Each structure stands twice: as structure tokens, then as C-alpha cells.
């Protein structure tokens, strides 16, 4: 059964096109196949200009410079802790002047947000795809646990830079509007709501469930335990995961027609 046929069989709505669009190539069904290893293409290629809107050489050069700087930033941040990572080294690897780095993003924190955006989108996209296309879907609690842990694992491995990313997203006001990670979090929230809507068609949630409100509560839990992970609030990851599952179970209680997975 193809992705399109399975979607029809479930009578579920189409996947919102705004979710992780940056990394979704054309495919015949509503869900794209799993992504290649992250290291193969950590920074999405700039979108080609349409025939109606030719791209100026200056804009093309600016986009190419941005890509080189973000790729260099990603490699530097992956090799050392965030505080020790130097923007001068990023400039050297990108082959640009030190000042040019700050024309791409004005701070090291925002460089980190932009550099890791592609990897986080890839992880989220792959996790949602696995859960939404499974021939035998897991219980909803297990699906949420799977998606959360895939992202939490990334943040745990890159704990230092992840703290900087969350400080930038949660505590910094951007005069120029939402940034990469703000959009990523919004797309993640949309993905959660879509997963809940599909769960209704699968009989895992009551038909009258307010998926917007429920997704918001689940998203709040995701952020709460992400901050707990980054601040090492639990003595070990097993206890953190157990507490997160219990919180999700409490949120889902009353919305499910059958007992949730323990």
C-alpha cells in the first residue's frame, strides 16, 4: 500500500504542508521517505529562483555565503563546547572575514540556532514519519515518547549549544520577527496536532477531542522536560523519561477510549 493509499484508508487529512517543508522533497504520497544520514546535508540548499523571479547575482552570492558560514558553524559547534567555540574559527573554515560571520547572524547564539535548525528538522520529520506511516501504529503514548526521545537525544548530546539555543528562543526578543528555531517549534506544534488528528481516525482518541488544546498541553510538557534535561534536573535519563511519560499519560487521560500504555 502506498503512502497515498494508506492515507485514504485511514480517512485522515493531508499532512500540513508547512511542517518541516525545508527538508521535504517531492514524493507521490503525503509523507516523504526517511531522510539520509544528517551529515550528508546538514544545511538545506537555498531554494532555486523561479523563472518569474530571477535571482540577482548579489542575492545568490549572499545565500551561498550564508550556507558556507552555517556549515562551518555547525562543524565548530559539534567539535567543541559552545562557550569555547570561536567565531573567528567559523570565519576561517567558511573562507570569509570575521565581520562577514555577523552579517549572517548577529550573535553566536543565533548562529547556533540557524546552524542546527536543519538537523533538528530532519530528526523531527523522521520521527513523525515513522509514527504516521507505521503499518501497525503504536499506542499514542508510545508515539509521543518516541518523538520526544529522538529530539531529547539530540539535545542531550549537544547540551551546551542546546542551552544557548533555548536561551535564544525562550528569553530573547527578536525585533526582526520569528527566527529559525521559533518557526521550528511552531512546526513541531503543528506536527503534534496532526498526529492527534490522525489518532482520532485510528480510534486512539475520542472523536470530539480538542486537538489544538491537547497539542498545546503536550507541547508544554515537551518544553518543560527539555529544560529539565538541559539543566540536569533528574539524577538520570531513565527517571526523566519515566516522569515525562507519566505527565503525558495524565494529559491524555480522559481523551482516550481505551486504557493508555503504562
Image (cartoon, helix red, strand yellow):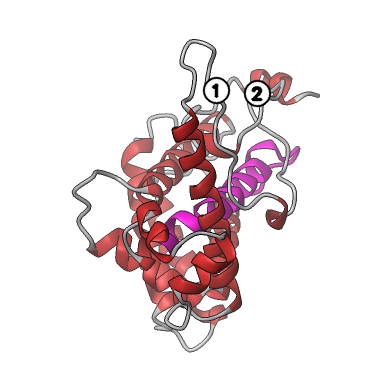
- Of the numbered discs 2 and 1, the one sitting upstream in the chain is 2
Find residue 83 and report its horizontal and vertical position in percent.
42, 81
The residue drawn where x is 60% and y is 67% is: 75
Q: Nearest the camera: 23 or 147? A: 23
The numbered dot on residue 209 is: none
Residue 17 lies in magenta, yes or no? Answer: no
Where is mark 1, residue-wise?
14
Q: Provide the residue span drawn in magenta.
A: 111-138
Q: Residue furthest top?
A: 52
Q: Are marks 2 and 1 in contact (CB under 8 Å)?
A: yes
Distance of mark 2 from mark 1, alpha carbons? Answer: 8 Å
User: Callout 1 environment at 10 Å: few (<14), some (14 to 19), or many (20+)?
Assistant: some
Report the quarter where the C terminus lies.
bottom right
Find residue 122 and report its horizontal and vertical position in percent.
60, 49
Find residue 79 and report its horizontal and vertical position in percent.
60, 76
The residue drawn where x is 39% and y is 81% is: 231
Q: Would residue 218 be seen by someone viewing this image from the given angle?
A: no
Numbered disc 2: secondary structure = helix
Residue 115 lies in magenta, yes or no? Answer: yes
Q: Residue furthest bottom?
A: 235
Q: Residue furthest right?
A: 1
Find residue 182 and report its horizontal and vertical position in percent.
35, 49
Q: Nearest the camera: 163 or 115? A: 115
Q: Main secondary structure of the magenta part?
A: helix
Where is mark 2, residue-wise?
7
Q: Closer to us: mark 2 or mark 1?
A: 1
Location of residue 2 by image quarter:
top right
Numbered disc 1: secondary structure = loop
The residue drawn where x is 49% and y is 18% is: 54
The residue drawn where x is 45% and y is 62% is: 97
Q: Would residue 115 be seen by someone viewing this image from the given angle?
A: yes
Instruction: Indicate whether 22 appears above or below 148.
Output: above
Amino acid at each position: 500500500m502506498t503512502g497515498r493509499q494508506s492515507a485514504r484508508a485511514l480517512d485522515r487529512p493531508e499532512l500540513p504542508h508547512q511542517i518541516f517543508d525545508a527538508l521535504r522533497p517531492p514524493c507521490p504520497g503525503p509523507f516523504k521517505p526517511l531522510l539520509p544520514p544528517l551529515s550528508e546535508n546538514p544545511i538545506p540548499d537555498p531554494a532555486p529562483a523561479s523563472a518569474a523571479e530571477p535571482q540577482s547575482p548579489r542575492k545568490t552570492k549572499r545565500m551561498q555565503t550564508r550556507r558556507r558560514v552555517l556549515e562551518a558553524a555547525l562543524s565548530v559547534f559539534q567539535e567543541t563546547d559552545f562557550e569555547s567555540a570561536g567565531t573567528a574559527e567559523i570565519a576561517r573554515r567558511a573562507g570569509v572575514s570575521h565581520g562577514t560571520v555577523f552579517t549572517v547572524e548577529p550573535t553566536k547564539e543565533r548562529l547556533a540556532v540557524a546552524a542546527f535548525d536543519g538537523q533538528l528538522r530532519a530528526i523531527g520529520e523522521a520521527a513523525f514519519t515513522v509514527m504516521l506511516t507505521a503499518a501497525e501504529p503504536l499506542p499514542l503514548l508510545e508515539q509521543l515518547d518516541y518523538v520526544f526521545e529522538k529530539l531529547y537525544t539530540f539535545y542531550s548530546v549537544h547540551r551546551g549549544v542546546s542551552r544557548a539555543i533555548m536561551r535564544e528562543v525562550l528569553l530573547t526578543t527578536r525585533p526582526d520577527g520569528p527566527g529559525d528555531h521559533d518557526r521550528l517549534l511552531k512546526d513541531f506544534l503543528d506536527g503534534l496536532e496532526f498526529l492527534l488528528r490522525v489518532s482520532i481516525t485510528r480510534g486512539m482518541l475520542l472523536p470530539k477531542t480538542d486537538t489544538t488544546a491537547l497539542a498545546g498541553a503536550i507541547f508544554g510538557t515537551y518544553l518543560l522536560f527539555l529544560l529539565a534535561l538541559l539543566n540536569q534536573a533528574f539524577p538520570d535519563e531513565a527517571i526523566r523519561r519515566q516522569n515525562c511519560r507519566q505527565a503525558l499519560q495524565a494529559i491524555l487521560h480522559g481523551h482516550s477510549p481505551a486504557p493508555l500504555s503504562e
